[in-house]
Image (cartoon, rainbow, N blue to C red):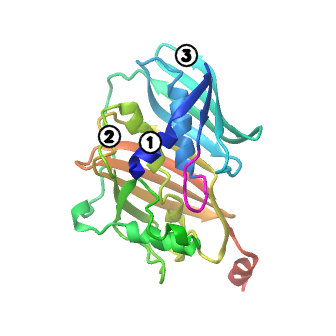
Amino acid sequence: MSLVQDTLNRLKLSRLDRLLFEGQPNDWPNRHVFGGHILAQACEAATSTISDEFHLHGFHSYFMRPGNAERSVIYDVDPIRDGRSFATRRVVAIQDGEAIFALSASFHRGEGGVSHQINMPDVPPPEALTDDEDYYRKALRALAAPSAKHRPVLPFEMRSVDRMDLENPEPKDSVAGYWLRLKEPIGDDHDLHARLLAYCSDFAFLSSNLRPHAMVPRDPRLKTVASLDHAMWFHSRDYRVDDWIYYKTEGYWAGQGRGLARGALYRRDGLLIASTAQESLIRLTDEAKAALED
C-alpha cells in the first residue's frame, strides 16, 4: 500500500453516533501524533454533520494535551448553530476521557462580493528546487529512529526555497516558504482536498520562528517545542492538493517562551487559496536560558 493511500485510510473516521466519531492516529516512526492529522480528522467530523450547500471557510483550534499514538481518538461534535448563510460546529478530540484538542469551525454557503488578495511572492518554481526528503531522513536520524532511516513519513512532496541546514544551522530570515503537493493524484472530492490542505498547513510552520535563531525543532537548546493553536481560513475552492501549492510562512514574533507565525497558501498561478496563523511553545532548556542572560 502506498504512503498516500495509507494516510488517507488512517484519516478516515468511523461514525459511532450522529455526532460522535472515532479515528486512528497517524503511524509515524517516532510515535508523535501529528497536529495536522488531528486537524484533518476534526474537520471531517464537523463537515459530516453539515448540509452539502455549506462549505468550510475557517476554523480556530487549540492543542491542549499531547496525543497518544497507541490509542484511537474520539471526536465529539457540538452543532452550535445552523443559520441561513453560516453554520458553526465545535469539535472536541478525546483520549482516555480527556480533551486533547478542540476546534471551532465555520461553514458558509458562499456569495458574490468585492475581491482582492495579497500577491504571491516571486519565488523559484518547484522544478528549480531539490526535494526535501533528505531533510526529513536527517530529522528521523536525529530522533534515533533507525528503522525509519529510509522510510518516508509525509505523503506530500516538499521543495523548500531556502532550506535550513540541519548539520550547520545559521540564522535565516523568518520569512520562508516551500512548494508542496501530494505524492499521488486523488479524486475530485473537494472536501477531501480541503482536509488535506489543513493537514499539510501544519508542516514546518513552527520552524519559521526558529530560523532567526539558527535553530531547528530538535536543537539541543530547546526543551519543548509544540503547537499551541492553529487557525485557517479558506479563500477558494478551486485548487488541488495533488498539484503544486506554494506555502509562504512567516515567524513574525517570538518571546516569553512562545512564537507566533502566519502563512499563506497559493496555487501555482498565484491565486491565494488559504491563510493560516499559529502560536507555538518554544521552551528553552535551563542551560540555554542561562546562556542568554550572560
Q: Residue at x 41, y 20 (%)?
A: 109
The residue identified by callout 3 is 82
Q: Residue at x 47, y 56 (%)?
A: 203
Could you say where residue 57 lies in the image, as x and y percent from the top left? 45, 32
The residue identified by callout 1 is 8
The residue identified by callout 2 is 186
The kind of residue on which mark 1 rests is Leu
Q: Is residue 10 magenta?
A: no
Number of numbered labels in the structure image: 3
Mark nearer the N terminus (1 vs 3): 1
Observer able to see residue 232: no
Helix, strand or loop at label 2? It is loop
Q: What residue span does the magenta drawing correspond to?
A: 25-33
- Binning the other alpha carbons within 10 Å of mark 2 as few (below 14), some (14 to 19) or many (20 upward) gives some
Q: Residue at x 27, y 62 (%)?
A: 123
Residue lying at the far front of the rendered structure: 1
Could you say where residue 189 lies in the image, as x and y percent from the top left? 35, 31
